[in-house]
Image: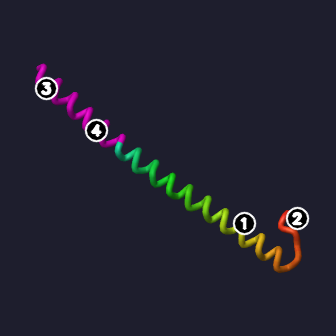
Amino acid sequence: MAEQNMQSLDAAVEETIELAHLAIEQTRAEITRSQALSQAEIDLAQAIEQIAEEHGVPADG
């Protein structure tokens, strides 16, 4: 009985570790997407500012 409980516990620990690794991978992917979106936002703001300057319009309004 104790051996069976130990095997069940080992399986539960392994599953928990796998789920933790999956959560870490997903979090890293979300961070990468967030960084890419932030860079795209910066690039867009710079492009808008450049276009506004080319047309003699203040970028603020």
**Residue 57 painted magenta:** no
Left or right of residue 14, residue 27 in this image:
right
What residue lies at 66% left-to-right and 63% top-to-bottom? 41
For the residues carrying marks 2 and 3, which lies nearer the camera in this image? 2
Give the secondary structure at mark 4.
helix
Looking at the image, is 51 positioned above or below residue 15?
below
What residue lies at 35% left-to-right and 44% top-to-bottom? 21
Distance of label 4 from label 1 (alpha carbons): 45 Å
| Residue indicated by mark 3 | 4
Q: Which residues are magenta?
A: 1-20
Left or right of residue 13, residue 60 in this image:
right
Residue type pointed to by label 4: Glu
Residue type pointed to by label 1: Ala
Distance of label 2 from label 3 (alpha carbons): 71 Å
Looking at the image, is 9 positioned above or below residue 40?
above
Give the secondary structure at mark 2.
loop
Residue 12 in the image: x percent, y percent?
26, 32
Distance of label 3 from label 4 (alpha carbons): 17 Å
The circle drawn on residue 45 is: 1
Please tell me which of labels 1 and 2 falls first in the chain. 1
Q: Are marks 3 and 1 in contact (CB under 8 Å)?
A: no
Label 1: how many residues lie within 10 Å, few (<14), some (14-19) or many (20+)?
A: few
Quadrant in which the C terminus appears:
bottom right
Please tell me which of labels 4 and 1 falls first in the chain. 4
| Residue lying farthest to the bottom in this orientation | 54
Q: Are marks 3 and 4 in contact (CB under 8 Å)?
A: no
Q: Are marks 4 and 1 in contact (CB under 8 Å)?
A: no
| Residue indicated by mark 4 | 15
| Residue indicated by mark 2 | 61
Q: Viewer-proximal residue, 25 or 19? A: 25
